[in-house]
Amino acid sequence: MERFLDQFFNLEVMARYLPDVAAGFVVTIQLALSVIVTGLLLGLLLAVIRAFQIRPVNWLIILFVDLYRALPPLVILIIFYFGLPFIGITMSAFVIAWIVLASVLAAFAEEIYWAGITSVNKGQWEAARSTGLGFTGTLFYVVIPQAIRMTIPPLTNRTIAITKNTALASVVTVEEMLTVAQTSLAYAANTSPLTMAAIGYLLIFFPLTMASRWVETRYAWKR
Amino acid sequence: MDMLDWEVIKFSFFNADSLREIYPLLLSGWGMTIKLCLAVVPLGFLFGVFLATLHSFRVPGINGFLVVFVDFFRSIPPLVLLIYVTYGLPFFGWDVPPFAAVLVAFTFNSGSYYGEIVRAGIESIPAGQMEAARSTGLSRIQAMIYVILPQALRNVAPDLTSNTIELIKATSIASVVALPELLRMGRVAQGLVYNATPLIAVAAIYLLMLWPMVRLLSRLERRMMSAR
Amino acid sequence: MAHAHDIASKFVVEAYDIHKSFGDFEALKGVNLTVAPQELVFIIGPSGSGKSTMLRCCNLLEQPSRGQVKITGEEITSRGVDINEVRQRIGMVFQQFNLYPHMSALGNVSLALRKVKKMARSEAEDRAHAALKRVGLADKAGNHPTELSGGQQQRVAIARAIAMEPDVILFDEPTSALDPELVGSVLEVMRELRESGMTMVVVSHEMRFARDAADRVIFMDGGLIVEEGTPERIFTDPRSDRLKSFLHSVTGH
Ligand SMILES: Nc1ncnc2c1ncn2[C@@H]1O[C@H](COP(=O)(O)OP(=O)(O)OP(=O)(O)O)[C@@H](O)[C@H]1O
Ligand SMILES: [Mg+2]
């Protein structure tokens, strides 16, 4: 037991690396927030464009969504990070992680928004159009507000799952929490920095996961 | 503009010579990925069914623990869990082979997700089903296996499919702890030929495996929506 | 349907001083019920009077808070009783049928024969076919519940109960979820069962069936038995005000 505590919860080691891990924590938060905001907005934008039912555009959107649903985010991340320099494109690791994860979230979010939009009763469209509201007006004032409600639970779950993937950014050397923890682990020959990172992730995601349970009962998406 | 020269792109991403050189590596990595999936999908699924079944029995005191357990593993990024198991346990002198470490980490992680899905499925079945089964003398476990679960799993088939896709994708994370699976071998190959063709090939193989599943999922989801 | 247990006691069902509370609410406040072999006991009463709860206490789908239940003389409320063994001998038919939607009629009827009575599949299916035939659904064995009418579904549910050859069958409003024109077929099957000597406890609002077929009618209200007697007596000579007003409300004057 003593050995366990010494190896995994070594307070002295933790104190030493706390500032580093805390800095990583901040980067993780920055990355997570950037991904969430841009991903959710881009997803909504795609769903709205899809609602206009322009054939070739829709195919492109479906292709984008399918690709991002079928490919592991880590594979995409690595292709961007190691592949783009071959053709002379270089971006900071943070920006690459941001773009990739935001695109993944956008793809999933688009599917969820789209499912929400199509699930709104046809009568709602007809009622709104009959009052003289145009297509765009109906979409924005009548359909989307109803759709959003039922998309909230699946969107919450998906957002949490994808935002957790910020840890993957460690593979492409973004100085986020896991990277810092791993470096510290190597220096200290002790697992405690990793424990700190784990606690950091729990601090962010445990309340969110709990909240998603509440959201699920509150906005129950009954199929 | 000349940096986006087609010849350069072709050389860096679609290099047939490179592919010829390293394809055995990719095939062996693919084999390992399939082996990993064949182990981790059933394990995670069964663990999830176990968690959900236990939850449905409403044993006092257990359910609160189960919720925390499941949310814990849904809150920790699988990569963190994996690194913890891989680099943490050896400090105890427990030498965990990478495959076992990956198995442990993914069983707990995916089991928690599967568990939540199956739980929702079980809760979607009217209480009368359990009562009818019990009234004929079936035990709680028997009623679960023969009456409740077959219906519950069918009701959540899209979510189960979706989670399975996510799990298969997540196995690529095992590359980080040097398990020689598809992505790992792709990166090894990339180091050999010094261009990105192996990575594109890796992506193509994942597409080959998962695109049909993604399409199937879309169909399942649409069917469920219209069946409401 | 002669069982070794029948000889042990002169009653098939005995329930003494049954209490049942849900939190602070007392749904049953001390109910006694005895059912003799081949008897059909009919339970009536207003909504919320505890009829279903009483029935469900007889096969321990609800655990009574207090009191004792015996089936063919064996006390099932005591510790250490194998409730699954006991439930084979107590059939139950539900208002909502509760058929298993993922199984055919035959699968519904044979499941417990195979898994509880441990019969071989062929033997179980022979018996299930016989039970389906008894309820007039020999030709529906392969159909799934969604392909059957409500009346047919409820008859499959009855077949599921009788296939186990129970000592008694409990019916909880077996016709309440049915369209009026489908009620007759289910009552017909119940009548046939009664004539074959099955012991039955029936909660229902089918007063006409009670008059024709019941040996005894029990009127419950507020978690208690208020009156009981022959159908004749209960329907033509109600004594308590509560029974009078209840009969008044159901016959709709
Ligand atoms: N599981 C439960 N939890 C809380 N209260 C319950 C439960 N089951 C029954 N009750 C309450 O116990 C009382 C008796 O219910 P019961 O279902 O036995 O009535 P009933 O006579 O069968 O009525 P109905 O004719 O409507 O079926 C009701 O007030 C009901 O609300
Ligand atoms: Mg009732």
Image (spheres, coloured by chain):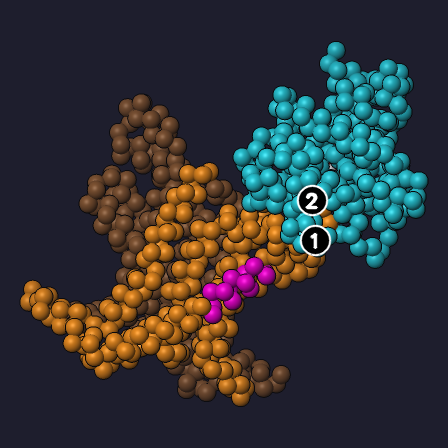
- What is the CA distance from the residue labelled 1 to the residue labelled 2? 10 Å
Q: Amino acid at mark 1?
A: Met
Residue B23 appears in the rendering: yes
Does label 2 lie on the same chain as label 1?
yes
Q: Nearer the viewer, residue B180 or C88?
A: C88
Chain identifier of the cyan chain? C
- At horizontal 40% and vertical 60% (from top left) the residue drawn is B165
Q: Does the segment drawn in magenta span residue B48?
A: yes
Residue C30 in picture, x, y percent from top left: 88, 38
Q: Does the segment drawn in magenta span residue A209?
A: no
Q: Which stretch appears magenta?
A: B39-51
| Image-quadrant location for residue B36 | bottom left
Chain identifier of the orange chain? B
Residue C22 appears in the rendering: no
Q: Which residue corresponds to mark 2?
A: C127
Q: Amino acid at mark 2?
A: Arg
| Image-quadrant location for residue B129 | top right
Mark seen at residue C119: 1
